[in-house]
Amino acid sequence: MPAPSHTNRRLPGFLLATGVVLIGANLRAPITSLGPVLPDIQSGLALDGAAAGLLNALPLLLFAVLSLIAPQLGRRFGLERVLGAAMAAIALGTVLRSVWLPQGLWLGTIVLSCGIAFGNVLLPGLVKRDFPESAAGLIGLYAAAMAGMAGLSAGLAVPIARLPFAAWRWSLGIWAALSLLTLLIWLPVMRADATQHASGTAQAAPARSVWRHPVAWQVSAFFAFHSLVFYSIVDWFASYVADAGISAATAGGYLLVYQVVAVATNLGSASLIRRVRDQTWLGFACGLRLLLATGGLLAAPHLALVWVIAGGMGAGIAMVTSLSLFALRTRDHHQVGALSGMAQFIGYAGAAVGPLLMGVLHDATHAWTAPLGLLILASLLVTLFATLAGRNRVI
C-alpha cells in the first residue's frame, strides 16, 4: 500500500488503509444482523409487519437525511475526526438496542444508523484524497470487508440467539466489539487530523454542484435501486422463505452464502474496474443477475439457494461498482464527497421504501407476489441506470 498523501502523509500507509477497511467492516453488520432474528423480535416485542418494516426502513431513512449534511461536517471538522465519532456512535447504538428494551431498540437503531450514515458518505472521499492512485482497489477492499462482515453477522445471528445463555439481543449487541476495536485503531489517525486542522489548513467546497449533472443522477439512481433490492432481501428473506418451509437457521445460512458470494464478487470486480476503460458491461451484468435472483425467488422459492447465489453476484458487482463510481466520475475528493452525499441521499431515500413497502404489501395481500414484483421492477431499473452510469464520463 503506497504512503498516504495530503493530511495523513506522516502516518504509515498500512495503518491508514487498515483503519479504512475496518471502518468499512462496520457499515453493514449492525443492519444485516437484524433480518434473521426479526421474527423473534416481532414475537418478543409484539411488532406487526408495518412496525417491523419501519424498523428495517429507519436506518435507510437516516442514511438519506444525514447524507446531505455529512460532506459539510467532514469539511468543517475533518474527515478523520467525523469518522471516529461515527465509530463511537455505532458502538453506542449497538449496545443500546440490545440492553434497554423496548425503547432502546428504536433509540439504538437511530444512534448507530447516524454513525453508519457518516461513514457511508465520507469514507470514499478520504480514500480518493489519501490514496488517489489506488482508490478503486482500496474501495474494493473495504467494500469486501463490508459485505463479508454483513454476511457473517447475518449467518451467525440465529446460532448466537439459540445459545443456552443468549437470545436475539446477543445477536445484535455482539458487533459493538468490532466498532470499539476500530475506534482504538483509528485514534492515531484522528490525532494526525487534529494537528492538521490546528495548523489552519482549509478544506474547500467543490466548485460545481453535482446536482446539475446528469451523470450524478445516473449514479444516484443506480445506487438507489440496487440498495432497495439489497436491503429488501436482507430484511425480508428469512420471513419469505419461512412460508416456503425453510427454517430460520437455514435462511441465515443462505444469507451468509449471499454475502460470501458478494465478497468474492466484490474483490473480482475491483480488480476488473482498475483494468477497463468504462464500467458499462459491469453495470449491465449486475442488473441481469439481480433480475435473475428476484424473478427466481418469485417463481421457484424452493431453489432459494440458487437465487441467493445469483443475487450475491449482482450485489457484489453493484456495491463495488457504485462506490468506485464516486471516485471515477469526479475530479477531486471534494467532488467525491458531494457526489457521495447526493447519491446516498437519493439512494437510501429510495432504498428505505423497499423494506417498508415489502411489509405493507405483504400485510395487505397476505402473499409475496406483490412484494417480489417490486424487487423485479427495481432490478430492471438497476440494469438501465447502471449501464448509463458505467460510461466513461466525468462530472
Image (spheres, rainbow, N blue to C red):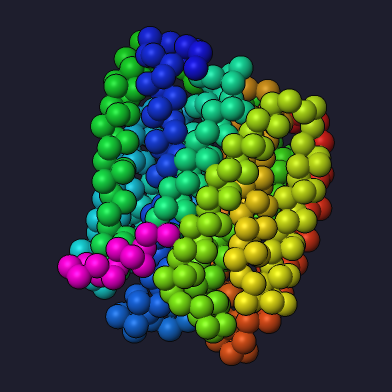
Q: Residue furthest left?
A: 165
Relative depth, front residue between 176 and 301 = 301
Quadrant in the picture for the C terminus: top right
Query: Where 217 sits versus 231, above or below?
Result: above
Residue 77 screen position, x and y as percent: 39, 29
Query: Where 160 sits versus 318, above or below?
Result: below
Residue 1 screen position, x and y as percent: 49, 17
**Total numbered circles:** 0
Relative to residue 111, is residue 331 drawn left or right? Answer: right
Residue 158 is covered by the magenta coloring = yes
The answer to whether residue 374 of the structure is visible from this angle is no
Residue 265 screen position, x and y as percent: 62, 43
Relative to residue 223, is residue 102 drawn left or right? Answer: left
Q: Residue at x 76, y 42 (%)?
A: 282
Q: Residue at x 73, y 70 (%)?
A: 295
Q: Residue at x 56, y 57 (%)?
A: 258
Query: Where 7 sits versus 223, above or below?
Result: above
Relative depth, front residue between 359 and 268 = 268
Residue 301 is covered by the magenta coloring = no
* Magenta part of the chain: 155-167
The answer to whether residue 244 of the structure is visible from this angle is yes
Q: Residue at x 53, y 57 (%)?
A: 257
Relative to residue 40, is residue 393 drawn left or right? Answer: right
Relative to residue 112, is residue 99 drawn left or right? Answer: left
Residue 38 screen position, x and y as percent: 40, 72
